[in-house]
Image: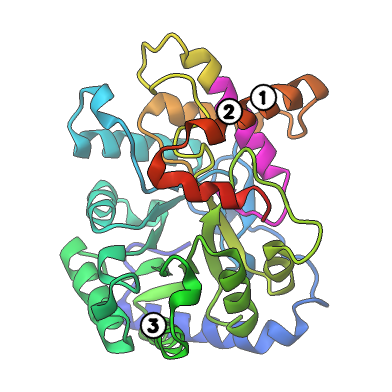
Amino acid sequence: MLDKHISRRDFVRDSAIAAAGIAAGMAMAKAAEPQKMDKAKVLSYNEQMEYRRLGKTGLWVSAVCLGGHWKRVEVMKQDLDKNRAEVVSRCIDAGINYIDACTGGEVMAYSKALQGRRDKMHLGYSWYEKEARSPEWRSTRKLLQSLDEGLKEAKLDYVDLWRITALEPGGDHTPQEREDMIAALDAARKSGKARFTGMSSHDRKWLKMMIEKYPDQMQVVVTPYFAKSKEKPTDSLFDAVRKCDVGIFGIKPFASNSLFKGDSSPNSPDAEEDDKRARLTIRYILCNDAITAPIPGLISIHQVDNVVKAVKERRELDLAEAAELQQAADEIFAKLPREYQWLKDWEYV
């Protein structure tokens, strides 16, 4: 476990040693015995929570984590900072130990929520507005400038994972832009500003290529997987994930809330049904052993408790549950907002 009083010098040294160890061990990855979890090194360990190994990072993260996005917080009638602090507190108490922040606003909100308890949760970072989706921020120099500016503004010394948010489709990146992103990730790890690195993309084929071409830098990927998703029988993204020992966080598990009947408000007449749909989806996703954890955006303590309950429930769905989830999943595509139509490409992964 990281000590919150660790010095930058010690951190940089340990990160360099870890990076060297990862590179040296890649050739032996297949032959190595499965790593066993050391409870003492798991952040916010709770015996009621399940933990999964985040690929070759060696980190153990909760089987469900906290996604950076929040939707419909206005229905909670709360101040955003207060809401995020309460949700983060409940996550820590329940043993959820990873937050994924992918916008400037999310980085600022969660860094504030973690003040005084930075050692309780791993923090994934992307300030996508100043990363590879913007032409002026695609060079190695500009990407590192963006990281430095973001860390300074959020008052962070380092992040556990820097996962650059790539263009959609990723294939629109030039070979030079790919090399620049990889060089930036390398430099961030060597400097100790990022413990581990990876990318986020909605482009399956491009992401598979990046994992196979840059296995050392692509330690973790962040990509969609929801109630209607399933693994392709051949040429699946998960083939590369398993082969290269990559950690994977699944975004949009509830398909931008298109899974649900209600509006996520506490008094919604559909709240009970929607809670059940959320739990069925989490259980379904966790049946895929290649996925480290789904990362739903959670807007209330109740929603945290509900996904934690899902982890504790029987993993495999029975026939009735599978039929119920299939019916809910079949409704998703008809309800997807215009800006999320691209999720239809993620039925087979």
Q: Which mark is residue 327?
A: 1
| Residue behind mark 3 | 12
Q: Which residues are magenta?
A: 275-295
The spot of residue 78 in percent (x, y) is 20, 27
Q: Residues within 10 Å of mark 3 (few under 14, many from 20)?
A: some
**What is the secondary structure assignment of the residue under circle 2?**
helix
The spot of residue 237 in percent (x, y) is 67, 64
| Residue behind mark 2 | 331
The answer to whether 105 is drawn above or below residue 218 in the figure is above
Q: Are marks 1 and 2 in contact (CB under 8 Å)?
A: yes
Dot 1 or dot 3: first in sequence order is 3
Quadrant for residue 184, please give it.
Answer: bottom left
The answer to whether 216 is drawn above or below residue 306 in the figure is below
Question: At 62% from the left edge and 54% from the top edge, which residue is drawn?
Answer: 292
Question: At 17% from the left edge and 32% from the top edge, which residue is drawn?
Answer: 79
Q: Is residue 326 left or right of residue 138?
A: right
Question: At 33% from the left edge and 83% from the top edge, which residue is drawn?
Answer: 9
